[in-house]
Structure formats: C-alpha cells, structure tokens
Amino acid sequence: MIIGIGIDLVECGRFLDWSAFKKQRIFTKNELEYADTDNANAEKHLANFWAAREAFLKALGTGFGEDISFSDVSVIHNDAGRPELLIVGGAKAALKELVGDEARTFLSLSDQDDYCAAMVVIEK
C-alpha cells in the first residue's frame, strides 16, 4: 500500500554559491565524497541529494524541524549504483510512527540541463 508520494524540483545553480561549511552542514560525508568524484557535475549531484530529502519529507508529510535534521535523510548508492535513501534519527522515528516497521522507500532521481528532480514513494 502506498502511504505517501513526494516530488521536488531544484535549480542546480543554487548550490554553486554555497560555502563548504554550509555544504558540510547539509550533506553527509558520503554524499560530498560522491559529488567530488564527478567535479564537473558536483552541483547536480548535490541538487539531486537535496531534492531527494525534500521529496522524502513531502511523502512523509512533515518538514525539517526540531525532530528531523538535514543529516537524518541522505542518499546512498547500492552495489549496482542505484540511489537509495538512508533514513536515520528523527526521520526514521517519524517514518516508523507513520508506517511501523514495514516501511519501504523508493527513490528516483533525474536531471536535465539546469534542473534536478527527485521522486520518493513510501510504501507499507
């Protein structure tokens, strides 16, 4: 059963001017390292990672706040290279409250020219 669907669209250029400090506050070490492996498209990767967080929170029906921080939701890649969500902390607690232990999330990322998009489906 589908519990929630979220989508987000981000202009990639907004990440060009972010300081290293701000990026380190928002993104995980793993995400920053992944983006650095492809310097020509680093901002696109970061934009996709940001869009994934936003799409997840929309699917969940919440936002960032006291209980959910930026680092509670991140993007990892499985052995085949497919992006997946890593959900910890307050985000994991909110997901468990909504769905219980049976939650599954699905993530799709896309980019075209100056825009990146993410879609998340939460399933029980």
Image (cartoon, helix red, strand yellow):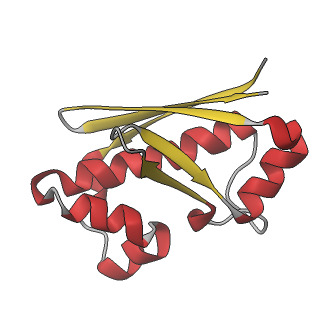
Residue 55 makes an appearance in the image: yes
Q: Is residue 111 above or below residue 101?
A: above
> In the image, is 123 to the left or to the right of 94?
left
Residue at image coords 42%, 45%:
78
In the picture as drawn, the residue positioned furthest to the left comes out as 40
89 vs 72, left or right, is: right
**At which x and y percent is residue 85?**
54, 46
Residue for point 67% across, 58% down: 64
Looking at the image, which residue is at 69% across and 51% down?
Answer: 63
Q: Position of residue 82 (x, y in %)?
A: 38, 37
Quadrant of the rendered image containing residue 29 = bottom left
Question: Residue 34 or 16: which is nearer the viewer?
Answer: 34
Residue 30 horizontal side relative to residue 68, left or right: left
Quadrant housing residue 68: bottom right
- The percent position of residue 87, horizontal first and vertical second, equals 64, 54
Residue 16 in view in this figure: no
User: How far from the left and from the top, in percent, is residue 124?
Assistant: 79, 27
Against 69, residue 75 (above or below) is above
| Nearest the eye: 52 or 16 | 52
- Residue at the far bottom: name it: 21
Query: Who's the residue at 84% across and 47% down the image?
Result: 96
Q: Is residue 121 above or below residue 45?
A: above
